[in-house]
Image (spheres, rainbow, N blue to C red):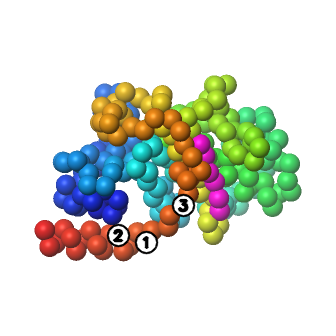
Amino acid sequence: AAEEFCGVAFSQAVIVREDPQFKQKKPVLVLDKAPVRGYLHFNVSHDHGVVFLVGHPRFSVGVDAMKMILPKAGDTLQGFFADMQGVMTRGEWTWIKAEDQGEQLQRFFTLWTMKEAFAKGVGEGLSCPLASLELTLEEGEWVIFRDGWRQRFWRLKTQQYANFAISFAVGAPAGMHPSYYSTVGADKIAPPGITDDDLCWRDIDLQALLLQAKQNKGSG
């Protein structure tokens, strides 16, 4: 991906995690030299053998994907929701349960993956309490609040792929931990101003990219 989008050789692209002393663990791309085309902010999610990779040249990104099935054989929808009661707000549970049972699991994972995508996008991941996040629909678009404060520099998109709920968050990382700036470099952080074009999918063949990277590494 670094070769495809940055024009940087495979051997010159290094992936590290942010400064551990700040307990930040978001993987970031560190380049030995200035990228030819642009920087690549990225994030990865995988579930049930399927991998999802998102990247953006200007904004921080987070992605999460979950197969829309009950996690354990024999689980009931009611039992699963009881176990997950604390990860959604009252308003979110109202939205989830507004449909019949066949749609409720889909709605749950739609919200779950958006929350996880945001948490990964800001570099906190599992350390971010999902109950502190609340999603609401405003004029057909999802917006996210954290501890009651609207995260106005972040936008969300969610859709289904096969039987997966997949969501990603895009943010001009205002509010990101300082270690993100020091690791990535302030010159690679875009100002606020996310457009609909920044939320567009571009499907790539990951196997073809890996094969190309191996070939380039061998020839170098």
Give how far across and how far down residue 68 sits, in percent.
66, 60
- Horizontal side, residue 89 vs residue 165: left or right: right
Residue 209: give its label.
Answer: 2
Residue 94: give its label.
Answer: none
Residue 159 shown in magenta: yes
Quarter where residue 185 is shown? top left
Residue 16 shows in this picture: yes
Q: CA distance from mark 3 to mark 2?
A: 17 Å
Q: State the predominant SS element of the stretch in magenta.
A: strand
> If the image is split into quadrants, where does the N terminus sit?
bottom left
Q: Residues within 10 Å of mark 2 (few under 14, many from 20)?
A: some
The correct choice, above or below, for 125 with respect to 197 in the image is above
Q: Secondary structure at mark 3?
A: loop
Q: What's the magenta region?
A: 155-160
Give how far across and how far down residue 118 sits, in percent.
55, 41
Residue on which disc 1 sits: 205
Of discs 3 and 2, which sits in the foreground? 3
Quarter where residue 100 is shown? bottom right
- Horizontal side, residue 29 vs residue 175: left or right: left
Which residue is more in the foreground, 87 or 12? 12
Q: Residue at x 30, y 31 (%)?
A: 182
Q: Amino acid at mark 1?
A: Asp
Give how far across and how far down residue 116 sits, in percent.
56, 44
Residue 124 shown in magenta: no
- Horizontal side, residue 218 vs residue 53: left or right: left
Is disc 2 in contact with disc 1, using a CB cutoff of under 8 Å? yes
